[in-house]
Image (tube, rainbow, N blue to C red):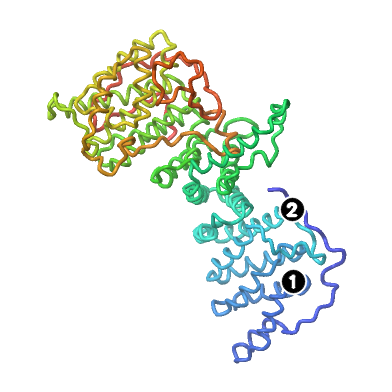
């Protein structure tokens, strides 16, 4: 926040003559007790006058400061009138007098604390009807106004530490509705995050508040709508191709990075602010501040559990976790371990366990900052759990009968699908190693695929198609017979009455391509995009140079990290509670 530079008045404020029709406030209050409301209403009328002189405002504030102990709950009307005065757009003397008044008011009568906080919070959003442009007022910027409000907030928190609770409640109630102008959301988020600079113990609650409201915004911005509007723009642009197109693309301006989808554009602005805040908290002069960043990581993981994870099919907000995990290797390992403990906890609802494993799989597949050794260690862990689970349940199942009971074995199917999904993205990197083929054979994936639980039947059709093609191409596992048999079986599947046949588990991969433009500068450099073949293409077209590829935005990150030390047999002792092998100390 920029430092304030108040515009001084040409003469002393007290030199101007003013007429006070209502007399002193003390006299008006005294007559009000006697039943005479005339002077009281005159005072209120003057306070509500937008053209009231600064000298008179100062007189009011100075007088009510000495009378603050008399302004009890019965005097709400005059207190409200005093708080609604646009004091922050006046001279520095008026601003100073108001601060003294507010501190005296909340100190003497805490009943007005919430009212004062609410009045200040309402000014954290730009006011289109502001009087600051009038010639009889000094010119002040929005930053000047916001800084003065934060100074008052800071003073209130200093004298009343418990004020943080009603302050958070008011912040929540005052959050701009999603249909409000962009500036309202942008400045409100900026101001809430600035509060954490002088009140660090409120940071976790403020971050949770901001993220929850961005989740509401994200939930109403559908992926296909964003893609459709952006694609329309691209088609229009293609009609006017220039020889200097690449040069023009390098000169991005505000209009070029603006999203065509209005709600997506608003979310993009807010996400960019949030990512910038994370960077400023985590880095000082380019160096990572480990202690502060570790604390931020813990707060984000807590918010992930309580606010992000329970919401299905989010597109963008969950990338706060993707970004925060990139700041240090131990963070991503701790986050995966945290999610894994939820997955293998039998006391957790199945849908929760399935959601956590989707986050693990999507993070392993998409994050370029995760070394291959960590990826293979996680694959070992998931495959080991699946084999252990099979050993315990197959003794109760006939080996000649193929089951697909999602209701009973949902976690098993989700873990199998997560394994296949990660392998689709990472098989090339693994096979670059001399031990790559040997590693895949040690996984014994064939045993999972041909097992009576028939995991390929429960997986997403696109995952099945790509995994089968990949395994056949490298002669690692043969799935064609199982897939063909599953395709022929059109009978209803147990537990699939309300789910799509193409997505029996109702699963999703949360770190699918990030569509927002401004904030993508924090995500695309650490994001692995998919450039492989379409799951619907036939394998016979492998040699066709004109075959259509599926491309995410950006390029593959050719990470050739070694996988030495990642091929140990990490089979957990039990499918109900396998542990995660620590690679580095956890920051928890």
Quadrant of the image containing the C terminus = top left
Quarter occupied by residue 395: top left
Q: Secondary structure at mark 1?
A: helix
The image position of residue 215, as x and y in percent, is 48, 48
412 to the left or right of 124: left
Q: Are marks 1 and 2 in contact (CB under 8 Å)?
A: no
**Disc 1 target residue:** 58
The vertical placement of 8 against 193, above or below, is below
The image position of residue 23, as x and y in percent, is 73, 84
Q: How many marks?
A: 2
Residue 581 seen in the current view: no
**Disc 2 target residue:** 4
Residue 74 seen in the current view: yes
384 to the left or right of 38: left
- Mark 1 Cα-neighbour bin, 10 Å: few <14, some 14–19, many ≥20: many
The vertical placement of 24 against 505, above or below, is below
Question: What's the CA distance linking mark 1 and mark 2?
Answer: 20 Å
**Residue 81 tag number:** none
**Could you tell me which residue is drawn at 34 percent across and 26 percent down?**
464
Q: Secondary structure at mark 2?
A: loop
Of residue 296 and residue 30, the one placed in the foreground of this image is: 296
The vertical placement of 140 against 35, above or below, is above
Of residue 17 and residue 210, the one placed in the foreground of this image is: 210
The vertical placement of 100 against 517, above or below, is below
**Could you tell me which residue is drawn at 59 percent across and 60 percent down?**
121
- Mark 2 Cα-neighbour bin, 10 Å: few <14, some 14–19, many ≥20: some
The image position of residue 212, as x and y in percent, is 47, 50
**Could you tell me which residue is drawn at 39 percent across and 32 percent down?**
360
Quarter occupied by residue 566: top left
The residue furthest front is: 239
The image position of residue 109, as x and y in percent, is 56, 71
């Amino acid at each position: 926040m920029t430092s304030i530079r108040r515009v001084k008045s040409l003469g002393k404020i007290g030199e101007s003559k003013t007429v006070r029709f209502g007399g002193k406030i003390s006299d008006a209050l005294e007559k009000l007790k006697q039943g005479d409301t005339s002077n009281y209403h005159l005072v209120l009328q003057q306070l509500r006058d937008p053209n009231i002189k600064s000298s008179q405002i100062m007189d009011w504030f100075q007088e009510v400061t000495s009378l603050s102990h008399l302004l009890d709950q019965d005097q709400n009307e005059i207190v409200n009138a005093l708080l609604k005065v646009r004091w922050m757009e006046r001279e520095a003397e008026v601003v100073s007098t108001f601060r003294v008044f507010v501190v005296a008011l909340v100190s003497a009568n805490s009943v007005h604390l919430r009212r004062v906080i609410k009045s200040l919070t309402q000014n954290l959003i730009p006011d289109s009807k502001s009087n600051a442009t009038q010639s009889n007022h000094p010119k002040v910027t929005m930053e000047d106004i916001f800084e003065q409000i934060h100074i008052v907030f800071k003073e209130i928190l200093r004298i009343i530490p418990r004020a943080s609770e009603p302050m958070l409640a008011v912040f929540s109630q005052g959050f701009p509705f999603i249909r409000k102008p962009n500036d309202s959301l942008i400045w409100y988020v900026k101001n809430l995050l600035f509060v954490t600079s002088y009140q660090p113990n409120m940071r976790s609650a403020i971050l949770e508040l901001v993220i929850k409201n961005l989740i509401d915004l994200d939930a109403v911005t559908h992926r296909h709508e964003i893609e459709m509007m952006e694609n329309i723009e691209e088609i229009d642009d293609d009609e006017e191709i220039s020889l200097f197109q690449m040069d023009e693309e390098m000169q991005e301006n505000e209009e070029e990075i603006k999203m065509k989808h209005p709600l997506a554009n608003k979310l993009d602005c807010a996400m960019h602010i949030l990512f910038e805040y994370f960077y400023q908290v985590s880095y000082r002069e380019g160096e990572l501040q480990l202690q502060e960043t570790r604390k931020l990581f813990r707060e984000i993981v807590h918010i992930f559990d309580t606010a992000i994870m329970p919401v299905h099919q989010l597109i963008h907000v969950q990338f706060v976790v993707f970004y925060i995990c990139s700041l240090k290797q131990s963070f991503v390992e701790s986050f995966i371990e945290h999610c894994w403990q939820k997955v293998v906890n039998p006391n957790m609802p199945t849908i929760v366990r399935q959601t956590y494993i989707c986050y693990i799989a999507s993070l392993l597949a998409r994050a370029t900052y995760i070394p291959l050794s960590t990826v293979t260690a996680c694959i070992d862990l998931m495959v080991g759990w699946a084999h252990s689970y099979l050993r315990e349940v197959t003794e109760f199942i006939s080996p000649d009968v193929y089951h697909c009971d999602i209701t009973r074995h949902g976690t098993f199917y989700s873990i199998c699908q997560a394994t296949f999904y990660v392998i689709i993205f990472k098989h090339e990197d693994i096979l670059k190693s001399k031990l790559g083929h040997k590693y895949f054979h040690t996984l014994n994936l064939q045993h999972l695929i041909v097992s009576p639980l028939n995991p390929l039947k429960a997986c997403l059709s696109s995952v099945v198609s790509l995994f089968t093609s990949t395994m056949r191409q490298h002669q690692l596992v043969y799935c064609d017979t199982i897939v063909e048999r599953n395709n022929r079986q059109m009978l209803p599947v147990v537990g699939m009455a309300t789910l799509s046949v193409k997505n029996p588990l109702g699963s999703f991969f949360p770190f699918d391509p990030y569509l927002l433009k401004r904030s993508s500068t924090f995500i695309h450099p650490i994001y692995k995009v998919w450039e492989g073949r379409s799951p619907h293409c036939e394998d016979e077209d492998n040699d066709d140079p004109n075959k259509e590829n599926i491309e995410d935005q950006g390029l593959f990150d050719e990470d050739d990290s070694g996988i030495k030390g990642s091929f140990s047999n990490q089979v957990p002792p039990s499918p109900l509670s396998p542990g995660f092998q620590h690679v580095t100390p956890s920051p928890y």
